[in-house]
């Protein structure tokens, strides 16, 4: 499927081409942002054997067509886990990684953990949000692991007898000395 934007003189402004595989498990999108027929952004989506969906987005230098950056996102089949690997300078080495994982418990409570990395494996920061089964208590903990700072925030909502609600927020910060 091709979609184009043209100016009043019918000159090409931009073009986007989407190609899907016959089995529907993969799709490729190529976008020419400036109408010069060179692809500036491409996105390839493929469904992996375990049901996860992987999308690789690449940007290209307009003048030379060389690879500028790549970002690969993998979303689990149930949607509860996302990993994004970014190669910011197109040299094939991952510069940033982030993961976003949600665990749902039988009682309705859940924990979502978002972790950012420098490079593929050095943890930079982590945010953990725990929500109670009734949804009335939310605990958020921030860890800046490189700096040894942890901050937390607890939000509790109480439903009063007259139907009104009272929300209590408490925050704390703990600065650890470097080990
Ligand atoms: Ca172009
Ligand atoms: Ca890189």
Image (cartoon, helix red, strand yellow):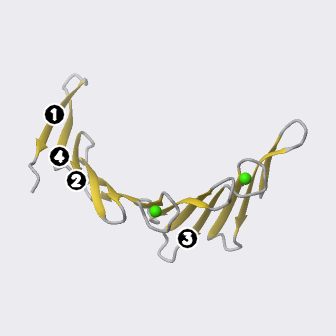
Image coordinates for residue 26, horizontal then vertical, percent: 63, 69
* Nearer mark to the viewer, of 3 and 2: 2
* Nearer mark to the viewer, of 2 and 1: 2
Where disc 2 sits, the SS reads loop
Q: Cα distance, mark 3 to mark 2?
A: 35 Å
Q: Quadrant of the N terminus?
A: bottom right
Q: Which of 171 and 96 lies nearest the eye of the viewer?
A: 96
Question: Residue at position x 44%, y 63% from top?
Answer: 78
Q: Cα distance, mark 2 to mark 1?
A: 25 Å
**Contact check, label 3 and label 4, Cβ < 8 Å:** no
Q: Cα distance, mark 3 to mark 4?
A: 39 Å
**Quadrant assignment, res 2:** bottom right
- Name which of mark 3 and mark 2 comes first in the sequence: 3
Q: Which of 78 and 73 lies nearest the eye of the viewer?
A: 73
Q: Which mark is residue 47?
A: 3
Image coordinates for residue 58, horizontal then vertical, percent: 58, 60
Q: Is residue 111 visible?
A: no
- Name which of mark 2 and mark 1 comes first in the sequence: 2
Image coordinates for residue 115, horizontal then vertical, percent: 31, 56
- Name which of mark 1 and mark 3 comes first in the sequence: 3
To which residue does mark 2 refer? 146
Q: Which of 139 and 11 lies nearest the eye of the viewer?
A: 11
Mark 4 crowd level (few <14, some 14–19, many ≥20, 10 Å Cα): some
- Name which of mark 3 and mark 4 comes first in the sequence: 3
Q: Cα distance, mark 1 to mark 4?
A: 17 Å
Q: Is residue 134 positioned above or below 111 on the image?
A: above
Residue sticking out furthest to the front? 64
Q: Which mark is residue 149?
A: 4
């Amino acid at each position: 499927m091709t979609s184009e934007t043209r100016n009043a003189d019918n000159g090409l402004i931009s073009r986007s081409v989407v190609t899907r595989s016959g089995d529907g498990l993969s799709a490729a999108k190529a976008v020419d942002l400036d109408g010069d027929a060179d692809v500036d952004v491409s996105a390839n989506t493929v469904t992996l054997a375990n049901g996860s969906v992987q999308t690789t987005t690449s940007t290209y230098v307009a003048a030379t067509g060389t690879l500028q950056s790549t970002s690969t996102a993998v979303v689990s089949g149930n949607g509860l886990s996302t990993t994004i690997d970014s190669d910011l300078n197109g040299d094939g080495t991952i510069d940033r990684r982030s993961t976003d994982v949600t665990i749902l418990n039988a009682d309705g409570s859940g924990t979502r953990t978002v972790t950012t990395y420098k490079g593929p494996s050095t943890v930079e920061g982590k945010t953990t949000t725990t929500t109670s089964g009734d949804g009335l208590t939310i605990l958020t903990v921030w860890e800046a692991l490189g700096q040894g700072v942890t901050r937390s925030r607890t939000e509790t909502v109480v439903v009063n007898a007259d139907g009104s609600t009272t929300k209590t927020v408490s925050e704390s910060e703990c600065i650890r000395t470097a080990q």
